[in-house]
Image: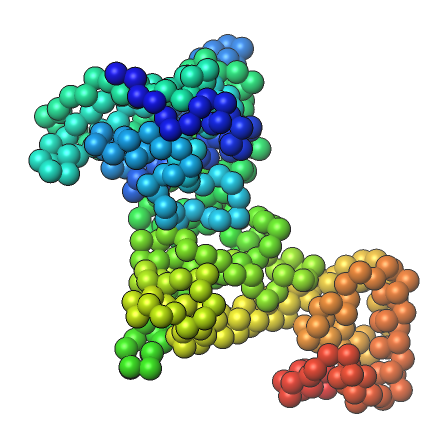
Amino acid sequence: MKEKVSVTDTGIQSSGLPRDYMEAVAEYIWNGFDAAASIIDITFETNEIDTIHSLSITDNGTGIDYEQLKETFGNFNDSIKKATFQKTSSFIKGNKGRGRFSFSAFSGKALWKTVYKDQTTGQLKAYEILITKNSKDYFDPHNNRDLSKGATGTMVTFTDLFAVTGFSFQSDEFKTFLEREFGWFLMLNREKEYQIRINGVAVPYQQLIAESDIGTLPIKDVEGKDHYFKITFVRWSERIGDKFFFYFLNSHQKELFKDLTSFNNNAIGFYHSVYVESRYFDAFNPQDNELSQNLFERTRQHGVFKSLMNHLHELVRLRQKAFVDGEAAEKLVDNYEKNGIIPKLNDGRKKKALLKVVKSLYCIEPRLFQGLNKEQQRINVGLLGILLEAGMKEDIVELVSHIVPLTDEDRKLLR
């Protein structure tokens, strides 16, 4: 029997659904991961002229409980999936019950075939749900039956396709989109062997990761209780977003909130993310900036969280310094030499000293070298060379100290 969604078809269409097939597919992938899936399969067949007549997205998750259809397919903008481990930086989240309607970006009809375990009897059950593009405010659950064997999971098949071909789902653009949207999540779950596959071939993400590191940080609260935080630092090989964040996830790996790191205003290619997972965030209210009156809820003012943030900022500072000291500084000097910024010096020792000062200054404050044209770069490096030639290295240190605060370590680096 057809069921009515708690909004009209026009209301659904005007709610801000994805208009791009890639974003639409991402919705269904996130839905699968929301249902505790570890494998998502995108499958389709093409003919000689690259036409596809259907596309299926299959997951090995928990399925869609028939008894909860009213709360899932029946409610719009009020999904039972209030919490999600998905990134909060883009629309494609599978939240508020809109994800299931995303097929209208490229398909006229969506058919769900799902297997779930009855929470009361433990019996495996299966049924199907049909929604059409021209009548999205109605869904048709049917063929509800018991199964004697099998596994839970959901397959949604899209037909009446338009504006897509086989190439649409095999192109580098589509694969890159999936890598950037899901790479971080696949990486966090690599020990569980999470995968997204296109016609049986896993979507790679490792090439996006320049370096990563995982550690555990224990922090004691005022009562002497230890809270443990799993911290994953990632430096990406390319920019995957406009900003760089700390992402905070609870014990179910559901993202609760995110904060900007303190290194968002540079142009040195230090593309990074930090993921913090802990049971500590199971009872955390990031919106409460005061000391909460709820004894069972923590806020940003909690002493443990303040200690955690101090550690995270120091972690990123040291990571950026190591990046600048190594890869970024070498790249700067190489570019300067290729572009004729470094003056020609016959004395190898003098050239080595000049390059050391340039690298040291760049490590201390990269912004001193940003936004300069070639003439300005030549003038800056030339003046440094003149000061070194005149034995005025201490004057360089003093001059820089008036521009940026120098630590004892910074001063030692310049000398």
Q: Residue furthest top?
A: 48
Residue 284 location, x and y as percent?
37, 63
Front residue of 403/90: it is 90
Q: Is residue 59 visible?
A: no
What's the residue at 73%, 75% (across, down)?
361
Decide: is 374 above or below 384: above
State which quadrant residue 32 falls in.
top left
Colour mode of the rendering: rainbow
What's the residue at 61%, 65% (across, down)?
263
Residue 159 location, x and y as percent?
42, 15
Residue 214 location, x and y as percent?
41, 63
What's the residue at 56%, 61% (across, down)?
260
Q: Is residue 69 visible?
A: yes
Front residue of 176/383: it is 176
State which quadrant residue 337 falls in.
bottom right
Q: Is residue 94 left or right of residue 407?
A: left
